Image (cartoon, rainbow, N blue to C red):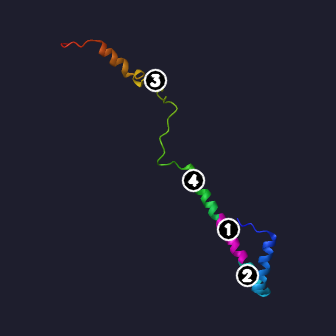
């Protein structure tokens, strides 16, 4: 995240030594070290919680999920391009045979 070279860290340390003095510098360094440690621990804990939530989301079924198709049910065959769907439907032969026979009014 932060990319400091050795020379930059040395300049920061020298400036801190001049500003804070040799008496207060060790205490400030310890305090900053604790803050950095706490920040890392909180970041690690947050990352672990997010990973746990993502794992739970992956295993929990979604309410908006589409129903799954069972392997026993065969999907209807797709009509080839240029042919109408009514040619392949089961009701089409019955309708055409009924239209071929004349309707008798008395029967």
Q: Is residue 34 magenta?
A: yes
Q: Farthest residue in the left direction?
A: 106
Choose the circle earlier in sequence order: 2 or 1.
2
Q: Position of residue 69 (x, y in %)?
A: 49, 35
Tell whether label 4 touches label 1 (CB within 8 Å): no
Please report the bounds of the magenta region as a residue range: 32-44
- Identify the secondary structure beneath mark 1: helix
Select label 2 or label 1 by which is in front: 2
Q: Position of residue 53 (x, y in %)?
A: 58, 57
Q: Which residue is mark 1?
A: 41
Q: Is residue 18 above or below residue 36?
A: below
Select label 1 or label 4 by which is in front: 1
Q: Left of 28 or right of it: where is 80?
A: left
Q: Main secondary structure of the magenta part?
A: helix
Q: Is residue 85 magenta?
A: no
Assess disc 4: are there few (<14), some (14-19) or many (≥20) residues with their C-alpha within 10 Å of its C-alpha: few
Q: Position of residue 75 (x, y in %)?
A: 48, 29
Residue 92 occupies quadrant: top left
Assess disc 1: are there few (<14), some (14-19) or many (≥20) residues with their C-alpha within 10 Å of its C-alpha: few
- Residue in the foreground of this view, choosing between 99 and 46: 99
Q: Which residue is mark 2?
A: 28
Marks 2/3: CA distance?
Answer: 81 Å
- Residue in the foreground of this view, choosing between 107 and 7: 7
Marks 2/1: CA distance?
Answer: 20 Å
Q: Which residue is mark 4?
A: 56
Choose the circle earlier in sequence order: 1 or 3.
1
Q: Which residue is mark 3?
A: 82
Choose the circle earlier in sequence order: 1 or 4.
1
- Identify the secondary structure beneath mark 3: loop
Q: Is residue 73 above or below residue 57?
A: above
């Amino acid at each position: 995240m932060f990319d400091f070279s050795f020379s930059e860290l040395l300049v920061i340390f020298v400036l801190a030594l001049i500003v804070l003095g040799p008496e207060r510098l060790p205490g400030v360094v310890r305090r900053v070290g604790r803050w950095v440690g706490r920040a890392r621990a909180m970041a690690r804990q947050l990352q672990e919680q997010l990973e746990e939530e993502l794992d739970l989301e992956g295993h929990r079924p979604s309410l908006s999920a589409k129903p799954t198709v069972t392997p026993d049910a065969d999907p209807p065959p797709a009509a080839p391009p240029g042919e109408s769907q009514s040619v392949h439907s089961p009701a089409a032969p019955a309708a055409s045979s009924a239209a071929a026979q004349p309707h008798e009014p008395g029967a």
